[in-house]
Image (cartoon, rainbow, N blue to C red):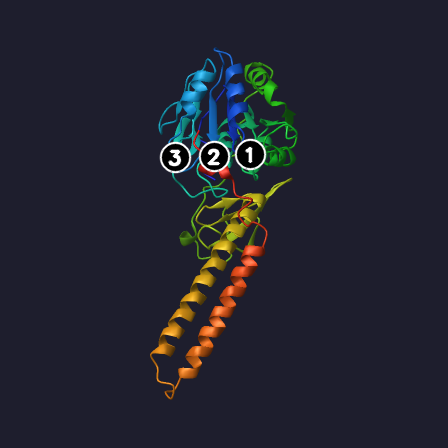
Amino acid sequence: MGDHPIKAGYREDTDNGAIGGSAGSLEPLRELAAALPTDLPGSVLVTMHVGEHARSRLPWLLSRAGPLPAAHARTGERLERGRIYVAPPGCHLLVRGGVAELSNGPRVNHTRPAVDVMFASAARWFGDRVVAVVLSGLLDDGAVGAALVSQARGLVVVQDPDEAAQPSMPAAALAAAPGALAVPGSKLGATVSAMLGESGLVTWPRPPQPQGTEVSMDESSDLQFLSPGETRLTRLACPECGGALAETVLPRISYYRCHVGHQFAPQALAAAQADSAEAKLWAAVAALEETAALARHLATHTDPGEDGADQHGKTADWATNLAESVRTRVLAAPDLGSHSDPSTREQH
């Protein structure tokens, strides 16, 4: 999830905010930005689900909403107090030693940028000096990252699921992160400002314990290959690349990652598997219809007395009937794509 080892001697005494959201999160995000003070003593990172090739106006919208300047983050840019850094479309936003880093690495929760990547990176580098905020959205991107922030003794705040336009993301984070606080959208700005500006937020900076450097499968001869921190291998295949998925168990949530780096929280994995199953079923329909078409073609170009003439007709009937059966069952099934996050196609 974009983790990096702690740089020797690194110390960050500034509180930092990290905000993630998806469908229905634009308005609460603008309200939050409007409530932040001009002299905010920390920086704010923002990841919103947008289409990877979309043009995002989110920095402009946030700059107009409140007193703090907002811009798309740039690799190598040192974070400054009183500024908002937005993940650009198609790039994960990470921090390394107080410096922004953009990554076009593997999708996490079937999306890029992903909230989990940003939260995990903030937890790694800022430890208990980070406030993670989860806004409205579908599925559960942000839940694993919120759990990691909580493990690092940072604070987790979510938009009250009861009033969120899409309660799934904040509800998942609330369940995954011990001590997470649910706050109405209208009060999020004041709450986050108080946390970032309060001298008693933490009594001392304590970065999380460094973890081992992740290695790739081609560097290991172990067929039971696990990256550091992973709990066990599963029989599940990655919906993105088909690689084997390993499970990592946290106190309140588990997540799944292949050796390439694609990663999924439980709801995101279920949605991705449903999308993959639907695609495979339609591929099966296409293959059967092509088989029937070829068999009919061969039947019409084969003399009745020749070997295989009858078999071509039987093959065409079999493939046609099976294709129609599969098509009917797919069309009658629950909407396999209903769990996909539509905000990945929105433009903010």
Q: Quadrant of residue 95?
A: top left
Please name the residue shown 59% across and 22% down the image. 185
Q: Residue furthest left?
A: 301
The answer to which of 335 and 29 lies nearer the viewer is 335
Q: Is residue 81 visible?
A: no
Query: Image check: 49 left or right of 255?
Result: left
- Is disc 3 placed on a helix, strand or loop? loop
Query: Image check: 252 left or right of 15?
Result: right
| Earlier sequence position, callout 3 versus callout 2 | 2
Name the residue tied to disc 2. Answer: 49
Q: Amino acid at mark 3?
A: Ala
Indicate which disc residue 137 carries: 1
Please name the residue shown 53% across and 19% down the image. 31
Name the residue tied to disc 3. Answer: 54
| Earlier sequence position, callout 1 versus callout 2 | 2
Q: Is residue 336 visible?
A: yes
| Image position, residue 9 (x, y; %) | 45, 26
